[in-house]
């Protein structure tokens, strides 16, 4: 998962069993049942029988593009580390197409900042400027490469100023395809002895549909081929464009989530269709009721849960959590990161761009709103914060 173009140690089995005896905090109602429960109180870390969303602990810890706080994002190195650190779900991945119609995992179709493509002279002439969702972007784009060409590239750290240690791993991993991720998911499930969940996102679907590279049908075909297109399949699909989720709702039975950016922004499919509504309209009771007609959850930016003041400090929580729960929707907001620049101002420690702030304090504050989970670049930190929360 990521923003729109205009924005930017694993728990032991013993610990997991121990949390199973504690009361669940922050649970949501989904389809008349408490998420993660089967009639009686359970706890974060417990995995009740029954499959589907109800099998996930709450608050759910979602490895954002893997464990991207420690490895270059959207690589198998990042995905596997997220599992090693205990993530309940791995966001594998942000889905974009190639020139020849394959689906690959990159944060954005522009890959100049996430691969070593600039070091490949044979691709120098592919550098171009395009208008992506209304924004002029210069670089190299997946839709201008065949899969075979993309496979010659290697991933690099996207934000080296904040994560200089991650640059150690530049050049180690190639770009994964979504089909490779689906096979990897099965392999990891067998190897680890528990179901591995993934949480892919359709990126810029309106943009790609206009290029003749519609994402939803390709994603649905792959899910169907691998038997992962059912209501209880361990694959949650997400998108910033509601029409993409509506389209997927007609193609597959997977759990679906609408991502929500800043309050005053408009989903790009709304812009293209002339729909004047903003995210503010979508998070009203009426808007949430509409979303609940075709999706099971929302993925709001954390600022929609607790806004910040002009100095970047957290203020008073909104009613979004309670309003969404009333409509049967789960909330998986984004994104928790350990480094100072990404934290609310009142949780920062110093000014170094790569220094950690009081991220546990921030988690505690967000968990207290009743959110059902959170995307995080640092799954181990999220797991420890959840343990603190359910024991508090």
Image (cartoon, rainbow, N blue to C red):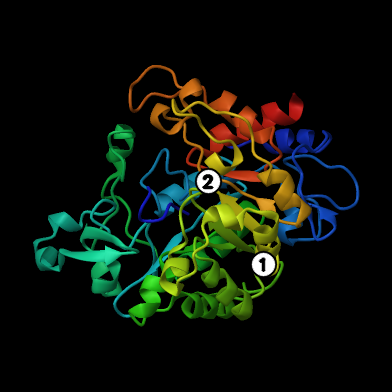
Q: Residue at x 44, y 52 (%)?
A: 2
The x and y percentages for residue 76 are: 42, 54
Please tell me whether mark 2 sits on a helix, a strand or a loop: loop
Q: Determine whether 190 is above or below 323 in the image.
A: below
Q: Residue at x 74, y 31 (%)?
A: 390
Find disc 1 in the rendering and name its residue.
233
Pointers 1 and 2 in contact (C-beta within 8 Å): no
Asked whether 266 or 384 is in front, the reply is 266
Tell me if residue 196 can be seen: no
Residue drawn where x is 55% and y is 28% of the image: 314
Task: Of the two numbered discs 1 and 2 on the same chain, state the one appearing first in sequence.
Answer: 1
Separation of residues labelled 1 and 2 (CA atoms): 25 Å
Which quadrant of the figure contains the C terminus? Answer: top right
Circle 2 is placed at which residue position? 301
Q: Residues within 10 Å of mark 1 (few under 14, many from 20)?
A: some
Residue 10, picture quadrant = top right
Secondary element type, mark 1: loop
Residue 29 lies left or right of residue 347; in this view the side is: right
Task: Give x and y (percent) for residue 318.
Answer: 64, 39
**Farthest right residue in view:** 39
Quick check: 99 left or right of 88? left
Q: Residues within 10 Å of mark 2 (few under 14, many from 20)?
A: many
Location of residue 285 (image quadrant):
bottom right
Q: Is residue 23 left or right of residue 275?
A: right
Counting from the top left corner in percent of width and height, residue 146 is at: 26, 75
Give the label on residue 159, or none: none
Residue 310 spot, x, y in % from top left: 44, 29
In the image, 351 versus 113, the foreground residue is 351
């Amino acid at each position: 998962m990521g923003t729109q173009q205009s924005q930017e140690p694993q728990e032991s089995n013993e610990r997991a069993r121990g949390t199973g005896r504690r009361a669940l905090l922050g649970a949501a109602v989904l389809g008349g049942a408490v998420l993660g429960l089967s009639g009686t109180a359970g706890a974060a870390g417990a995995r009740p029988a029954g499959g589907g969303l109800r099998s996930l602990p709450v608050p759910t810890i979602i490895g954002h593009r893997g464990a991207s706080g420690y490895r270059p994002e959207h690589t198998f190195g990042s995905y596997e580390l997220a599992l090693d650190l205990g993530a309940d779900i791995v966001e594998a991945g942000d889905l974009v197409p190639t020139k020849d119609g394959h689906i690959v995992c990159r944060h954005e179709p522009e890959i100049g900042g996430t691969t070593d493509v600039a070091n490949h002279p044979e691709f120098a002439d592919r550098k171009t400027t395009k208008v992506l969702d209304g924004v002029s972007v210069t670089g190299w784009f997946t839709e201008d490469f065949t899969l075979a060409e993309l496979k010659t590239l290697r991933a690099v750290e996207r934000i080296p100023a904040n994560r200089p240690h991650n640059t150690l791993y530049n050049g180690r991993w190639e770009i994964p395809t979504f089909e490779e991720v689906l096979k990897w998911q099965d392999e990891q499930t067998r190897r680890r002895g528990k179901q591995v969940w993934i949480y892919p996102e359709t990126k810029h679907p309106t943009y790609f549909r206009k290029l003749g590279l519609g994402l939803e049908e390709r994603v649905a075909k792959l899910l169907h081929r691998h038997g992962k297109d059912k209501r209880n399949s361990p694959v949650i699909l997400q998108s910033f464009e509601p029409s993409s989720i509506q389209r997927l709702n007609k193609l597959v039975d997977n759990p679906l989530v609408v991502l929500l950016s800043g309050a005053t922004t408009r989903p790009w499919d709304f812009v293209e269709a002339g729909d004047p509504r903003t995210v503010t309209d979508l998070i009203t009771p009426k808007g949430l009721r509409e979303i609940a007609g075709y999706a099971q959850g929302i993925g709001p930016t954390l600022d929609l849960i607790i806004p910040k003041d002009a100095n970047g400090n957290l203020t008073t929580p909104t009613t979004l959590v309670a309003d969404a729960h009333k409509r049967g929707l789960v909330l998986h907001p984004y994104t928790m990161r350990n480094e100072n620049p990404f934290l609310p101002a009142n949780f920062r420690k110093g000014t170094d761009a790569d220094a950690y702030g009081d991220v546990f304090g921030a988690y505690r504050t967000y968990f207290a709103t009743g959110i059902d989970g959170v995307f995080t670049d640092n799954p181990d930190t999220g797991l420890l914060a959840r343990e603190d929360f359910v024991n508090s």
